[in-house]
Image (spheres, coloured by chain):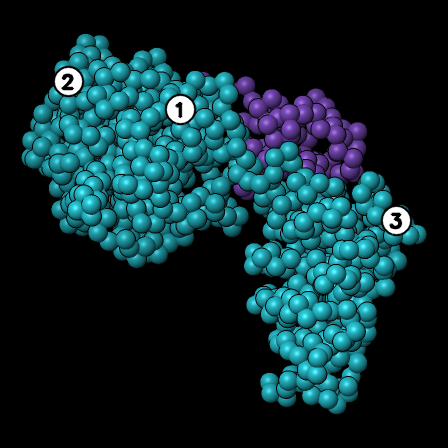
Amino acid sequence: MIGQVLGHCRITAKIGEGGMGVVYRAYDELLHRDVAVKVVRKDAGLDASSSQNLLQEARASSSLSHPNICAIHEVGETDGDLYIVMELVEGKSLYTMSAGTGLPPESVLRYGVQIASALARAHDRGIIHRDLKTANIVATPEGLVKVLDFGLARRMGGGVLEAPTMSFSTVQSASSVSGTLPYMAPEILRGESVDARGDLWALGVVLYEMASGRLPFEGRTGFEISTAIMREMPKPLGPPVPPGLWAIIQRCLAKEPLQRYQRASEVQAALEAVQSGAIVSPNVAPDQDQPGPPKITTMHSVRHAQIKKGDSLLLVGTTKGAFILRSNSQRARWDVGGPYFHGHAVYALAYDDRAGQHQIWASTSSYWGTLLRSSHDFGKSWTNPPQAPIRFPADTGTSLKNIWQITLGPADEPNTLYCGVEPAALFETRDAGETWSLVRGLFDHPHRPRWLPGNGGLALHSIVLDPANKQRFYVAISSGGVYRTEDGGITWTAQNRGIRAVFMPDHFPEFGQCVHKIAMHPSRPERLFLQNHWGLYRSDDSGENWTDIANGVPSDFGFPIVMHPHNPDCVYVIPVDSDEFRCSCEGRLRVYRTRNAGATWEPLARGLPQKQAYETVLRDAMATDSRDPAGVYFGTRSGQLFGSRDEGKTWQRILEGLPSIVCVRTALVDGGSAAAVRSPAVPRSDGMKSAASHKTHRSASRTKTRKK
Amino acid sequence: MTFHIPGALREFTAGESTVKIDTAPRTVADALTALWTLYPGLRDRLINEQGQVRQHINIFIGSENIRYTGGLSGPIQDSSEISIVPAVSGG
């Protein structure tokens, strides 16, 4: 074979030999590089179909590009011999390096992280190694690990490959399965189907072997080894093996696949945690008893409202939990479900009906941290993710205090959501909440160090998307002011010209205003309304300039500001007495409405308490629904929930005695998935967005009618 | 080493109120890392993303709060009893 040319590779030397074939060193005369060529013997027991499988597998593996995976350059056939051209890796196998007493823990961790990373990439591409072992992993003199033979170890025809991969191990494998016996997971020995978790078991064996120099399951015969794998626990590893590493190995070697890590990336993260010696590295492994994040918690002891198609919903967040209220289209009587998240503060809620789903999002905050959770069954069960989905990266030196706002992305991007958090920052997800990332463009803004916390903390509480321009959206921060991006969040500019900051020496600074809330009607995206810490404003030019519109309100101090769903000139606010007092003016609880974009305001008080009513309504505790006539709802710090089903003309107390209300959102349930198919654009979780949804919904209905 | 798990977190330990871990940690951080390697859901409930114990969570080794015994880098014995206790605070 020496001197022969396969493809464009001239064989120069023999490297090794095994039951399946021979591995040669070769020179690629086309690309001028040294390579390794594995030639599979004609007598390796492959039938035609098996050969084809091997070729397909090798081709699939050749798509893997990862620094810790030995690259496959080419596969081919010559004179009936299959050959595979691959990266030439020069180094020592971990089998050789681990012999004796094993490797130092630092090396085990360093190599383990790289192996796990390689597996993670392969598994993401649907490729399982099936024969991971120390003999198949090479460490270069520079400390770089290369995993060899991805996807090559596969059962072929009816036969068994004794040592199917490049290592040509002499270990006898069990009948009717591929792989190398001491590294085989119990489910493989049981003849069950193999998935990526079989590789994670093998990784556990590799880690054990690297750490100790011996295999976790040993025996003189294949039967003894198999028995040990199936029934015995590995001998514990003590110092110098760190407890964290031993715990990871144990979890990889759980007999049942469900009790193992479920993904290689979880093992990688856990190894990195131990490697760093810090307690901060991410650990995303799922819970042992119920693997596969996100974990779901069923709310057995909570009363649930029975929700039907066509119902109106009120989502109410309080400092001690959330409530879900339902009513029919009349909105006269409300059925109450909850409290959900008993004892947890729920500052943000959202209803997401994009893509035909009924998902409620909630932020929960307690002793145990702040989490973003969701329910697909109107609160009967909620995700309870082992790892907090929204978290500041380690390099920020910052930790999450609260999630103030959950905002849905565009209707045609159902996997996009945004969260505004405290300390002030914006997070986004593009995969329906699976992963969240910090919007660095805003976090790294040079103004950020000079933003100051308001009374409620330094919070990013408003996120307003421009429905006419996906690249443009606004956020508002207390106390930082309004910021706008024109490039989807990469860069941000302060948009506060004309907004007062009475607590600053310069009353009209570029930024630093304590903006309490902003609102936009989707049909007029260039126009914004703003409730300030002292001041009511409107901008007609996308936030470039702001005009005072506090014409006739008893106070221009307040918190919420919400749009009428169908009238872009109609806005609701609830003035409070002053910065110091922050209660409804003159002890009279009144909503104020403008129907001419702020030229004049009118009080709406019929049905609201007008004596000794010193109430406070917080920034997110007010919303409108999308019905016609529109509903308007708000909750107070004293735990009263009020609603109007006639656009504010008259009011009723829906509930009292709740904990302090911090969030109110609305939704219209437009049927199950079948209904959603019929009318794909259905309402949203707050009044501002409801307007757009409602409009689209009508439009969609008309379109359907025409199609009929 | 034995951990005593408060009721609110037993959802993440398959309902177990105590968790015994057969390791030899040198520090509280080692011990906790071993705990949430087994039960990952506990980690983010006890510390924030910067690795600090949450403000209203107390961790006791025996009867000593680790805030007064060296924090997470404080020493620990194989036979230690570790209690996780939410603070008595709030309204």
Type of amino acid at the residue the image marks with label 2: Thr
Residue A271 vertical position relative to residue B21 in the rendered view, above or below: below
Q: Secondary structure at mark 3?
A: helix
Quadrant including the N terminus of chain A = bottom right
Front tag of 2 and 3: 3
Residue A623 vertical position relative to residue A438 in the rendered view, above or below: above
x and y percentages locating residue A289 in the rendered image? 64, 33
Q: Which residue is drawn at the image coordinates 22% and 30% (left, top)?
A: A624
Type of amino acid at the residue the image marks with label 1: Ala
Is label 3 in contact with label 1 (beta carbons under 8 Å)?
no
Quadrant including the C terminus of chain A = top left
What crowding class fits label 3: few (fewer than 14 Cα within 10 Å), some (14-19), or many (20 or more)? Answer: few
Q: Chain of mark 3?
A: A
Q: Chain of mark 1?
A: A
Q: Which residue is drawn at the image coordinates 37% and 54% (left, top)?
A: A441
Q: What is the letter of the purple chain?
A: B
Residue A223 — which label?
3
Q: Secondary structure at mark 2?
A: loop
Viewer-proximal residue, A12 or A57?
A: A57
x and y percentages locating residue A707 in the rendered image? 20, 48
Residue at the disc numbered 1: A322
